[in-house]
Image (tube, helix red, strand yellow):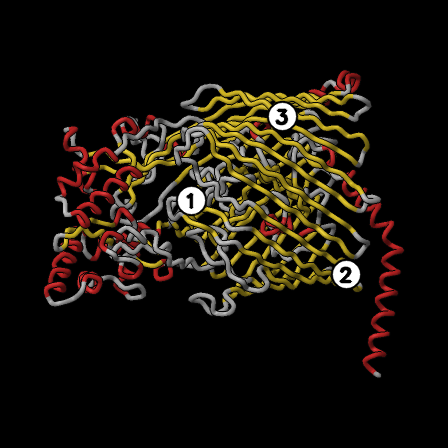
Amino acid sequence: MKSKSYLILVLLSLKSFAQSQKENSKTSQDSIKKEMLKEVVITASRISETFLRSPISIEQLKSADVKNMGSPSCFDAFENLKGVQIITPSLGFKVINTRGFANTTNVRFAQLVDGIDNQAPHLGTPIANALGANDLDIDKIEIIPGAASALYGMNAINGLANIQTKNPFEYQGLSIQQLTGVNHVGNIDRFSPQLYTQANFRYAKALNSKIAFKINGSTTGGTDWVADNRTDLAPTINSSTNLYGADNPAFDEVNSYGNESANRKTLTLNGKKYVVSRTGYRETDIADYNIQNYKGDVGLYFRPKKGHQLAVTYKGALINTVYQRSNRFRLEDYTLNQYAIDYQSDIFQIRTYLTQENTGKSYNMRSLAENMDRAFKSDDQWFSDYTTAYKNAINGGSNVANAHKTARELSDLGRFQPGTDAYNQKKDELVNINNWDYGAALRVKSSLFHSEGVLNWDKLFSSFFKKIDAQLLSGFDYRTYIIVPDGNYFINPVNSSKNLTYGKTGGFTQLSKDLFDKKLRLSATMRLDKADYFDLKFTPRITAVYSPKEEINFRASYQSGYRFPSIFEGFSNVNSGGVKRVGGLRIMSDGIFENSYTKASIDKFQAQVNSDINTLGLTQAQAIDKNKAIIQKNPYTYLQPEFVRSFEFGFRGVVLKKSLFIDADFYYNSYENFIAQVEASIPNTKDAALIPTSLYSKASQSRYRLWTNSKSKIYNYGGSLGLKYKYNNVFSFLGNLTYTKLDRTDDKDGLEDGFNTPKFIVNGTVITENLWRNLGASVTYRYQNKYDYVSFLVSGEVPAYWSMDAQVNYNFKKPGVTAKLGGTNFLNKTYYSMLGGPSIGGLYYLSLTWNVGKI
């Protein structure tokens, strides 16, 4: 009887609650219409325009929205946006990408803070949000999925994110935020549960109507996710001798370093050919997973008269985390500093900034592993000992598999063991040797200087442009990179005593015109860029927006874009494990392309020679002569800029009595001169008859990894659908679906950079605001299907995964404190967002934010 009474009481409560929400529903529907119609964006066209009438796809994330998501920070919340893919090489380092060709150093996607590029100069890409704004200072974030080169000219051919911060004149007061969490829950890896902390503060003050300032600071500390993928990257390399799995003497785990192809030899043992690798070290044994990042900024703002503002800012960051390129790195005492001056008015804007980078005491984990092995025993000595030990084991009655294991154990006697004093002393020595043939140090100092200006002709000559109902915008930019040659990562091949410089100058003009009583808006943009080592490049953009009424908008655009090689792609000069990575500019790689043979053909040739010796009983000379036609000359040549053409169609509108917002887009891209890498070798002989023999042995060839252009024409296409439905003042739903597809045609040379993008990504979020008094909550479901991942560290298939984020928040109005209790990957179902990276588990946190003033 009691249970029935409780049931009746619950039903009556729900009925009352539903009636109250129904009364408020008209207000909520009007509010979503107002929100979508009046919201202003800038990034899409570099002028203020309403969100609905933006001529290209643009996503927006407000700091207030993040409070209602399970993400612990604004940067993490990117993953909830339509069209956005996040890959996670580290808990302290996440990479944003849109529309395919993702990798851990995504040079095709630009990231700005208040229009200022926050990239690390020598990388040509940001280190996550290391130099970005902290959550308390973020006003909103605008993301352009797709080419943005015509307006920004910064190689933004995949997309661009612009983080807009709070102006101290409008947002004054003190804010303090403390987030405390825990990860590594449930014994999913080598760690017990670990503490994760993030502290942010912001203070802004207007001294009067003309002068204001703000100060921001942030610290992040915790224990990184662990990379411990033990899949063998060379499972069939000894298939002709039936050695697989743990019996494979060339066993190469994904996250084990020092046993890669450069650390192998083909040994002749009892008449058979075996590929044998050095033992190497697992990342879990040698990595430092401690995260300790700091960043801060200070800005002084001056308004000499109405509509004018001068901003002088400084940003700094100190980074200690794991970072991933072709190899995994430990960033230690890595610093970034940025100085900027920005003057804005209604008519013009001019901005200049300098970014300085110092890699500090950072090091390459692969080089550490392989040179730790070599410090114990040289390659020649180790392989000689292995040969002797194997033969002794066979003579003692061991079978082949056990003889290989015995040979490794005996050859490794006395090897440096992680955790011992001897290992730690040797590690301290190696991480400070700036030569990857002997050490592991990453020692780079670089700078980026940038100046740009924009002029609004329609504001300067307002009466004329009002008559013709048009807008005219022009801009210029100049950028130069300055690299200090370190003798390992970078050299100056012309003058070793001088810094490397690499500059670019560009400009654009954009004309926009409203027609048919402002129902049709057309715009055209033309951009010119001239970079060192390359000819002048033209980049046009044409857009059209048709709005039969204010709530309904159709858009179409065509744009093209160039990506000039980054500093690393153009100028690198790195010796790593017997392979020299060389920039693709002629100044760096002159003569290598013309005289080399592709690694792919050499690997196939070597494998077939070994197979013929082991299975057919041929001599080495006979097998080499039989298979020499497999070897192919390197068909590639020196770097040219990458080029993309992009067509896009979309719809954005408010329907269903103004309660449902819809944003849909479809795009089609074609790429030419796609920048990628090829491995090739030059035989150490000029006698054509001896070239096959020279290329059979790694000891008699010079090996290179070269940046070049694919000969393929590459096409990709896709689309996305985003929905926002507000049921009433309490409940709302956000959902999106992204589809991305790679289509290769023409010359399929296999040199394309990894597409590395799932075909489907789905996000769905249910939000309740003011569910009870000031209590809110949300749940987010995220899914992406399996996809192929290609990189020089590892290639293979990333499994499909789904995850859930959840949070509850409560606003204590009197003390001005907001509490948020939540978790990402709430069910702790571990997954990989990429190969070679870490396994990602759940992160659970409590965040407290205290605001005093107009924040």
Q: Can the viewer see residue 431?
A: no
Q: Which residue is mark 2?
A: 813
Q: Using the image, determine if residue 564 lies above or below residue 822.
A: above
Q: Residue at x 58, y 58 (%)?
A: 803
In this rendering, does residue 598 appear at all?
Answer: yes
Q: Are marks 1 and 3 in contact (CB under 8 Å)?
A: no
Who's the residue at 68% across and 54% down the image? 765
Q: Position of residue 666 (x, y in %)?
A: 63, 35
User: Which three-letter amino acid code belongs to the residue tagged 2?
Assistant: Lys
| Above/below status of 637 relative to 294 | above
Query: Looking at numbered disc 3 in the image, what kind of residue is underneath it?
Result: Val
Frontmost of labels 1 and 2 is: 1
Secondary-structure class at tag 3: strand
Q: In this figure, which residue is indicated by the disc labeled 3? A: 454
Q: Which percent across, then down, holds residue 732?
A: 75, 53
Number of residues whose C-alpha sits closer than 10 Å to that of mark 3, classed few (under 14), some (14–19) or many (20 or more):
many
Q: Earlier in the sequence, mark 1 or mark 2?
A: 1
Of marks 1 and 3, which one's residue comes earlier in the chain? 3
- From what the image shows, is residue 404 above or below residue 553? below
- Disc 1 marks a residue whose amino acid type is Val
Quarter in which the N terminus is drawn: bottom right
Measure how far apart labels 3 and 2 are at the Cα level: 43 Å
Residue bearing the label numbered 1: 790
Query: Badge 1, how many Cα within 10 Å: few under 14, some, many 20+?
Result: many
